Amino acid sequence: QVQLVESGGGLVQAGGSLRLSCAASGRTFSSLGMGWFRQAPGKEREFVAAITWTGLSTHYADSVKGRFTISRDNAKNTVYLQMNGLKPEDTAVYYCAAARGPGYSDSVYQYSTWGQGTQVTVSS
């Protein structure tokens, strides 16, 4: 069973950058796809980015494409989300999630383990 802990959230001005980290425990991390989701107040949790177990393939929501980059370091059991050009509409709690298999998906139902979330607030 994988356990996930996110870090790196905070308050940033519009146009700024943040890097989120998700530290995983458990031997199966390196064999699983990973994803980042976010949830703003009063809204449903939405897909942000995902990466396969090898790190060779990635997938992004249209709203973050070209601004966010997902990556992973299997030796460190960590997945990252580099966020550049942040906008006020990026404000949300960001969650890291482990997929049910080695691939990636933009559906919350394809992820079996979730972190506790980290708050990202972008001021205008």
Image (spheres, helix red, strand yellow):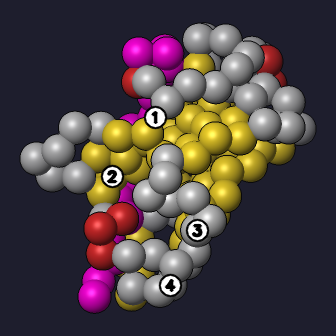
Mark whose residue sits in front, 1 or 4: 4
Amino acid type indicated by mark 1: Gly
Three-letter amino acid code at the position of disc 2: Val
- Asked whether 71 or 85 is in front, the reply is 85
Residue that badge 1 annotates: 115
Residue extent of the magenta highlight:
109-124
Which numbered dot is residue 56?
Answer: none
Q: Of circles 2 and 3, which is in front? A: 3
N-terminal label among 2 and 3? 3
Type of residue at label 3? Arg
- Camera-nearest label, 2 or 4: 4
Q: Is residue 49 left or right of residue 91?
A: right
The kind of secondary structure element at disc 1 is loop
Residue sitting at 63 percent across and 31 percent down?
A: 34
**What's the distance in space between the residues labelled 1 and 3, CA to CA?**
23 Å
Q: Check disc 2 and report its element: helix, strand or loop.
A: strand
Pointer 3 residue: 67
The 10 Å Cα crowd at callout 1, few under 14, some 14 to 19, many 20 or more, is many
The quadrant in which the N terminus is found is top right
The numbered disc on residue 93 is 2
> Which percent across, then down, holds residue 24?
65, 33
Q: Is residue 121 magenta?
A: yes
The residue at the point 28 percent across, 88 percent down is 124
- Decide which of tag 2 and tag 4 comes sooner along the chain: 4
Q: Where residue 117 sits: x, y (%)?
A: 39, 45
| Circles 2, 3 touching at the beta carbon (< 8 Å) | no
